[in-house]
Amino acid sequence: MVGRGGPRMGLNEQPRRGSGMDVAEKVRQVIAEKLQIELAQVTDQASIVEDLGADSLEQADILFTLEDEFGITADDADEAEGLKTVGDIIQYLGKKVAS
Amino acid sequence: MGAPRPARDEGKTREDRILRRVVVTGMGAVTPVGLSVQSFWESIVEGKGGAGPITRFDASDFAVRIACEASDFDPDGFIDKRDARKMDLFAQFGVAASLMAWKDSGLDGGGFDPTRAGAVVGSGVGGIRTLESQHSVLMEKGPRRISPFFIPMLIADMASGLVSIMLELKGPNYCTVSSCASGLHAIGESMKAIERGDADVMVAGGAEAAVCPLAMAGFASMGAISARNDEPERASRPFDLDRDGFVLGEGAGIVVLEELEHARKRSARIYAELVGYGATADAYHMTAPAPGGEGGARAMALALADAELAAQEIDHVNAHGTSTPHNDRCETEAIKSVFGVHAAKLAVSSTKSMIGHLLGAAGGVEFIATAMAIMSSVVPPTINYETPDPQCDLDYVPNQAREMAVRAALTNSFGFGGHNAVIVLRRFEG
C-alpha cells in the first residue's frame, strides 16, 4: 500500500497482542513511550495529568492506543473521563479485556 | 506601470519617511543541500544540487520519481521526542530552522519584550503527510481511531504557532498561505509589522514537507514537475531551453527581523536591511502567470518604489526561477519591463536550480540566499544552464558562482493563484 508519510504517532506501532505481556505491563509501557518518561515513574498511584504531566490530547492518545492494542472500544466516554491514575486505566482495561 | 505611491517631498529620503527601519539579525535553514545556513550557503556557492530519487516513500509507480529531499534531517537535535511525535514534518522543519535563527540572532539570551515579538511562518500545504497517513487509518480502522493530534498536526499555521510557543513570542502570530509565495509574504508582512510599530522583533519565513504520494501525483498530473527521472541532478534547469518543470523540494528558511534601533542597542550582528516589499495579484489564472509576467512586474516596481531605489542601484535578482517553461519566460519579461536597459546588467540567479522548489518554504530559503549574497559579495549560480533559450536572454550567472559587490538585491516569489511577493534587500552600511 501507499507509504506511511507521517511521524510515528503510536497508531502505526506494531501491536504486540498475545505476546504474553499482561494488561498492566502494556499500559505502563504505552504511557512511558507516549510521554517519553522512565518506566519507573509509571506507578499505579501516579495521576496521568498531575503527576506525569499529560495534557488532554496526550490522555486521549494514550487511551486510543491502548484500545487499539487490546482490540476494544470505549463505548462510554464518561467511563474514560473518570480514569485519573495509571492504576485506574489498568483496572478499566483489565475489565474490558476480560469481558 | 502606473504611479504606485503619491509624489514625495524633494530632499527627503526613505529614512525620513520610514521612521522604523528593519534589519535581519538571525537566519536558520533546513534544506536539501544543507541542514544549516552555513552548509546551505557553501553548497549553493559550490553549485551543488540536492536532487535525487525519492526516498520518503515508494515512488516506483509514479510518473515522477525524483525530488530534492532534506532526508538527513533528524528532529532529535532540536525537538524533544515527546513534542516531535505531535508535529508533522513541515512543523519540525519550521521549528528547527526557527531555533537556529533565534540562536543566531542572540535573542535567545533575552533582552526583549515578548509582547512585541511575533512569528509568521508560512506554508503552502501544511501537514499533508499527516493527512495522508491519517486518511489511511480512517479507511482501514474507521473514524474512532483518528489521532487526537490529527488536527493540530494537519493545520498549516501550526509551525508558526509552535515557534511562538517554543520561543515564547506573544506578538503577532499567524501563517501566510500563498503557495510558492507563502514564505516571502511572511517576511514582507513581518517587515511591515515592525515598520508600523506593531512589533520590534519578528521570526519569519516558510516551511514545507510535501514530498509525499498525493503531492507528487498531483503535480505530475498537472504537468508542473520535471519527469527527468533518469538524471535527477540535471532536471532543475531554470531558464534553460530544455527545462520541463520544477523539481519538488522540502525544508524551511527562517529569519529574525528586528527594528534597527532595537538591534543597535544590543549590538546585534546585522546581515542586511529590508528596504522594499511589493505584493500584487495577477488576477489571471489558477496556475499560469499573466502574460508578460505583468503581475510580477508590478510587484517588483512596488518593491523598488518602497525601497526608493532606482533600477540601476540593484545588482542581483534572486529569481523565482522554477524551471517551468511559463514562469521563466514570464519572469524574464517582467524583469526586462521593470529594469529596462539595466536588466542586461543584473546577475539573475535561481536557487531552485540546486534546491528545487520548496513551495511555501522557497521564499524563506531564497531570502536567506539573497542576504548571504549581499553579505559575502558572491552571487550563487543557476546550475544546469546548458542551452540558452532565446526568450530568456538575461545573465543568469550560469553554472559558476560570481564574486561581485552586491549593493542591493531583489528576491521574487510567485505563487499558484497569481500571488506575487517581492522584497528588496540592501547592504547595511550603518
Image (cartoon, coloured by chain):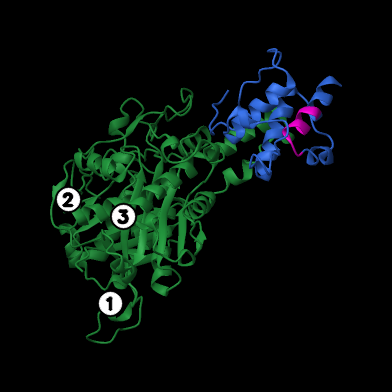
Chain colours: A blue, B green
- State the residue at coordinates (24%, 39%): B43
Q: Nearer the viewer, residue B76 or B18?
A: B76
Could you give the CA–CA distance between mark 3 and mark 2, rounded to whole angstroms? 22 Å
Residue at 28% x, 36% y: name it.
Answer: B49
Give the secondary structure at mark 2: strand
Choose the circle earlier in sequence order: 3 or 2: 3
Residue bearing the label numbered 3: B331
Quick check: do tags 3 and 2 share a chain?
yes
Whole-percent x, y for residue B147 in the image: 66, 37
Secondary structure beneath label 3: helix
Marks 1 and 3 share the same chain:
yes
Q: Chain of mark 1?
A: B
Report the number of numbered marks. Answer: 3
Residue at figure coordinates x 30%, y 60% from the top left: B334
Task: Tell me where residue A58 sits by quadrant.
Answer: top right
Amino acid found under the numbered disc labelled 1: Arg
The x and y percentages for residue A57 are 66, 43
Viewer-nearest residue: B3 or B11: B11
* Residue assigned mark 1: B14
Locate the N terminus of chain B by quadrant.
Answer: bottom left
Instruction: Measure the alpha-carbon separation of dots 1 and 2.
Output: 27 Å
x, y percentage for residue B10? Answer: 24, 87
Q: What's the magenta region?
A: A84-91
Q: Tell me the chain of label 2.
A: B
Question: Dot 3: within a 10 Å radius of its alpha carbon, few (fewer than 14), some, or many (20 or more) residues?
Answer: many
**The C terminus of chain B: image quadrant:** bottom left
Q: Are marks 1 and 2 in contact (CB under 8 Å)?
A: no
